[in-house]
Amino acid sequence: MKKRGRIKIHKLKTWQLLLILVPFLFLDATLLRLDHIKMTELRDAVLAADESENDEETTKRLEELRGFVLSNMVINVVDDNGEQKITFGTGPFYLEHQYIRAANKALEEAESKLVDDSNPNGNVYAKASETCRAQAIANGWTWDNPNYINCMVSEIQKYPAADELHDTIKASLPSTELYRREYASPVWAPTLTGFMILITLIIIVVIIIRMLVWIVLRLSLLFV
């Protein structure tokens, strides 16, 4: 039976292989898209947990996302400084709300340190806070909004002799890299998607070899 199967495959003509290749390519694209959709759903679940300020749930969702990406072929298109690039994996994303909470906490700690500020301009933090709180109310910002944090840092920089204060606050703010996540997927994985792509590649290789043999034979006949 195996021998007969091999003979039948061997006897398939090139045009027949091309016809077989078309649905295989469609199936590969469908499976890759399903894997990408699943990855997107898991990543959105991470961001939703982060937005809800549930760190335990966020960690759990991150593990689910990481486990899926590391065991599946996930092709993704990411933006790299305005350029669209294809990558294997999630691409970079940030736990924005965890960062905002940490940055806001750092600002609160800075406020407590600057209450007795001897700066000739008075309590620089208090003045910056007064300005930014007014903007926050006008624009509907919450106190953990990144626009409010940026406003505070910007206002503090406006005062003379505030460089030291600015450096202190800047040093207190956590690095955004601490809240950056990116998981890479393997180029090939032993999944349904992986095996279907492998079969498709074999068919393509057979077609290319047959075409090369045909071209060589045609060229050799020209010189006979």
Image (spheres, grey):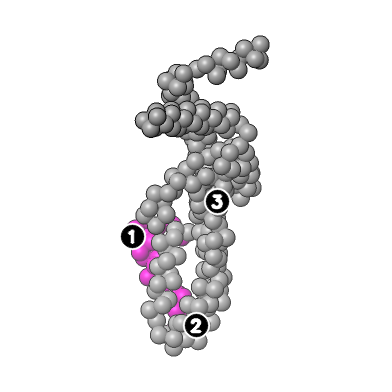
2 or 3: tag closer to the N-terminus: 2
Q: Position of residue 211 (x, y in %)?
A: 44, 29
**Which numbered disc flags the more N-terminal residue, 3 or 1?**
1
Please tell me whether mark 3 sits on a helix, a strand or a loop.
Answer: loop
Name the residue carrying label 3.
182
Front residue of 163 and 85: 85
Q: Relative to the observer, which residue lies in front, 6 or 100?
A: 6
- The amino acid sitting under disc 3 is Glu
Q: Which mark is residue 96?
A: none
| Quadrant housing residue 61 | top right
Image x and y of residue 212, in percent: 45, 32
Packing grade of label 1 (10 A; few <14, some 14-19, many >=20) is few
Residue at (53, 77) in percent of width and height: 168
The residue drawn where x is 45% and y is 46% is 86
Report which residue position mark 2 lands on.
164
The amino acid pointed to by label 2 is Glu
Q: Which residue is mark 1?
A: 138
Q: Quadrant of residue 3?
A: top right
Residue range highlighted in magenta: 122-143
Please state, as top left, top right, bottom left or bottom right, where the C terminus lies in the image. top left
